[in-house]
Image (spheres, coloured by chain):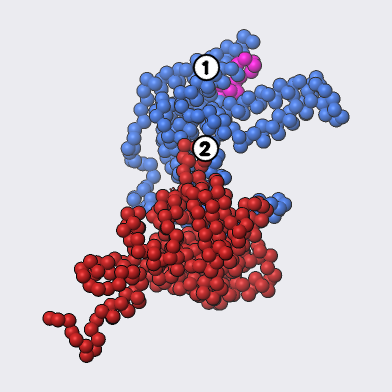
Chain colours: A blue, B red
Amino acid sequence: MIRDFTFGQFFPGNSILHRLDPRTKLLWTIAYIVQLFVCDAWISYLVPFLYLVLVIWISKISWVIVLRGVKPVLPLIVFTSVLNMFFVTGTPIVSIGFFHPTYEGLALAVRLTLRIVLLIMGTSMLTYTTSPIALTDGMEQLLRPLEKLRFPVHEMSMIMSIALRFIPTLVEETDKIMSAQKARGADMESGSVIERGKAMIPLLIPLFVSAFRRAEELAEAMECRCYRGGEGRTKLRQLCYTLLDAWTLLSAVVAFGLVIGCNVLF
Amino acid sequence: MAILKTEHLTYRYSPGTPFEKAAVSDVNLEIEEGAFVGVIGHTGSGKSTLIQHFNGLLRPSSGHVYLDGQDIWADKKKIRSVRFQVGLVFQYPEYQLFEETVFKDIAFGPTNMGMTPDEVKRAVEEAMEFVGLSASLAQKSPFDLSGGQKRRVAIAGVMAMRPRVLILDEPTAGLDPKGRDRILKQIRAFHDQTKTTVLLVSHSMEDIADYAEKALVMNHAKLFAYDTVESVFSRSKELEELGLSVPQITRVFHKLRADGMPVRENVYTIPYAIKDLMRQLPKKGGVPHDS
Ligand SMILES: Nc1ncnc2c1ncn2[C@@H]1O[C@H](COP(=O)(O)OP(=O)(O)OP(=O)(O)O)[C@@H](O)[C@H]1O
Ligand SMILES: [Mg+2]
């Protein structure tokens, strides 16, 4: 069922990774993504890979869960890989009629697959080990300088934390409405694309109605508690950097250096 | 023959994860055709999970569910026809309404069954009458109705499919006492007139005593008892240990007996209680208690 996907979920725990400052983890993730895209020489992919293995090991999150996070994008990976193999020009491996898979295409396909898989596994480590509240808190703090440019940082992060908070609720609601309509004989699994699209109406309308109702109720509840934006608002949990954060960021810099080193040398 | 039967029915949520949980465990049951069954059990005891097996919304982790002696999962393609025979009204069903008019919403199920427009019309009108919705509401938007009316529309939506078994998950949750009584009376009338088998989940022991013939008690995912209402409520000590209770009037009568009044033991409904008390009172012109 829909509940079974893991990407973006939070798995509570008490590892070093869980205890890191969310700002550090955010910066680390950005560094990791850039590092992945800087990789050029084949051997340089080893750096983010080993780094990721280390991070997963430290986080004590099971491999099964991390690998399962990649499952939803598998079709995409297969699709782009096949396209690349057949449509990139270069030295053909074999020729079957119109199709000429090439060595260059194969290389590109492998490279893309590596990047996507490492990217998803790496970025999901952020959400696996950081609670949504900590995550938006960290983002708000990191973006704070933008307030000088009149960017509504607090409002944006409030919107984000509310959205994250309601994902599980809406998933549960979707499940429930789907069951209720199936009990009335709705058939959402078979038929042509158009029929299936039509079959979604009994699901989508109640879902939207309830989302609006929830939004209204929440807005009222916030107003009742005198919410009036971020001005002068203090935090129950103050974020503060520790030595651990410094070491983490330093390790990211070292990894970055290693990747560039690999690129230059090989 | 039993219309619904389960054999070693077990269901686990999120199997293979740290959140795994058996919500129904080794339940063996036989529900007779035409019965009116009250389903009780504390919060989280697995009532909702159990009833979703009867129309194939949930597939047992292990064990079997039989409808008319046929395993409903023997042929996966037939599961839709099982859903037409076993109608299920969820808790807070008013949140599933989606059509432009009340008529169209109630017609959703019958139309999916493949009834002709004439049959659909008749089924909808009949169902609206059963739940006490006046015909003038048929062309209104379901979103403009009151909460209680919406609930009726949703219940009618399942009744209109003319199921052989009608299952309702707490149909009276969040209604005022009058609305509760009305809905329950209408369900009882539906049962009496159409001979439909009814399963009613409720947290109110009074409602079960007043309307049901049999009681099914769930406790921590296990079937605790399935018997006539009288025999279930006569085990009041055990029920209280499960965090359930017996109807208030039963408790009053137990106290009276403990205090030495010669009242009957198994009293579950107010009318019966009145009859019994009247029996105790001195008849007009009779001999008063020795004073
Ligand atoms: N979708 C789900 N995923 C995981 N666990 C669930 C899910 N639905 C129910 N459970 C768990 O299964 C158990 C039984 O739940 P169920 O809803 O069947 O109880 P219930 O008897 O209907 O309770 P209530 O009287 O509160 O409606 C509960 O412990 C609940 O936490
Ligand atoms: Mg329930």
The C terminus of chain B lies in quadrant: bottom left
Judge whether A104 appears above or below A238 on screen.
Answer: above
Instruction: Name the quarter where the N terminus of chain B is drawn.
Output: bottom right
Crowding at mark 2 (Cα within 10 Å: few <14, some 14-19, many 20+): few
**Residue A11 appears in view:** yes
Left-right relation of B32 to B267:
right
Element on which disc 1 rests: helix
Mark 1 CB within 8 Å of ligand 1: no
Query: What is the magenta segment's predominant secondary structure?
Result: helix
Query: On the picture, is B9 further left or further right than A198?
Result: left
Residue B131 screen position, x and y as percent = 51, 72
Residue that mark 1 sits on: A255
The crowd level at tag 1 (other Cα within 10 Å; few <14, some 14-19, many 20+) is some
Q: Over which residues does the magenta segment extend?
A: A34-44
- The subunit carrying tag 2 is B
* Front disc: 2 or 1: 2
